[in-house]
Amino acid sequence: MKALPTLVVAFLLALPGQARPEPSALPAQGTVEPAFTPWDDAEAAVLRVLHEARKTIYVQAYLFTSRPLARALIEAKNRGVAVDVLSDREMLVKDEAGRSQIPHLAESGIPVWLEVRYVAAHNKIILVDPEEATGAVITGSYNFTFSAQARNAENLLILRGNPGLARAYLDNWRRHRIEALPYPQGLLD
């Protein structure tokens, strides 16, 4: 089956009641690095990948309270890496304690968009240089929080060396970005 162009797929997926293309299987290739909290240091594994970024980092977060991860994203931006963040609007609105790092990321000049279409924008991914052969996809149940590392039972996968997989995740990130509102405007809508 021939792949549909990204914009056509995004248009089809945005139409309610429309047939959606079947997901396609990707060849197994590259490496898989698993981490399981609280036993493994998943945060350190994510930090290691962020420090390796050379061109782009795309984040899609349900919760983002980790100060070390926020610092790493800001450091990446300051060394010339393009960093873009999508965040769940509702979780940011509910952050009465002010622990979210999303405002801090935006204040540092990182473009942030808020997902408003879904009851829960529950994706937890980081794409590092996804258009490069050495790109990494970070995904799993692991929220980007202290609790995910220290208090919860979570899983994290770092997948490298699979350009088709990285492209699929990047296409999905971009589909969500089209529907998102810029921070802080999205808080007011």
Image (cartoon, rainbow, N blue to C red):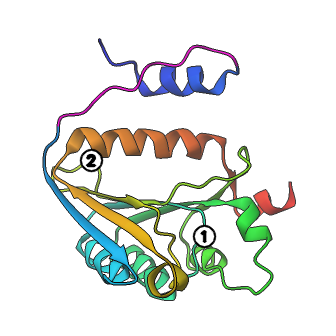
Q: Quadrant of residue 5?
A: top left
Marks 2/1: CA–CA distance: 25 Å
Q: Quadrant of residue 155?
A: bottom left
For the record, the magenta segment spans 17-27
Crowding at dot 1, Cα within 10 Å, few <14 / some 14-19 / many 20+, comes out as: many
Front tag of 2 and 1: 1
Q: Residues within 10 Å of mark 2 (few under 14, many from 20)?
A: some
Query: Which residue sits furthest right?
Result: 188
- The chief SS type of the magenta part is loop
Disc 1 secondary structure class? loop
Q: Quadrant of the N terminus?
A: top left
Would you name the residue on which mark 1 appears? 63
User: Tags 2 and 1 in contact by the CB under 8 Å rule?
Assistant: no
Q: Position of residue 19 (x, y in %)?
A: 57, 14
| Kind of residue sitting beneath label 1 | Leu
Using the image as rendered, state which of residue 23 and residue 104 is in the foreground.
Answer: 23
Identify the mark nearer the N-term, 2 or 1: 1
Residue identified by numbered label 2: 131
How far from the left and from the top, in percent, is residue 34?
Answer: 26, 66
- The residue at the point 30 percent across, 72 percent down is 35
Q: Splitting the image into 4 quarters, where does residue 93 fall?
A: bottom right
Residue 20 colored magenta?
yes
Amino acid of disc 2:
Glu
Q: Position of residue 179 (x, y in %)?
A: 65, 41
Give the residue at x 23% y 73%: 52
Q: Is residue 34 left or right of residue 102?
A: left
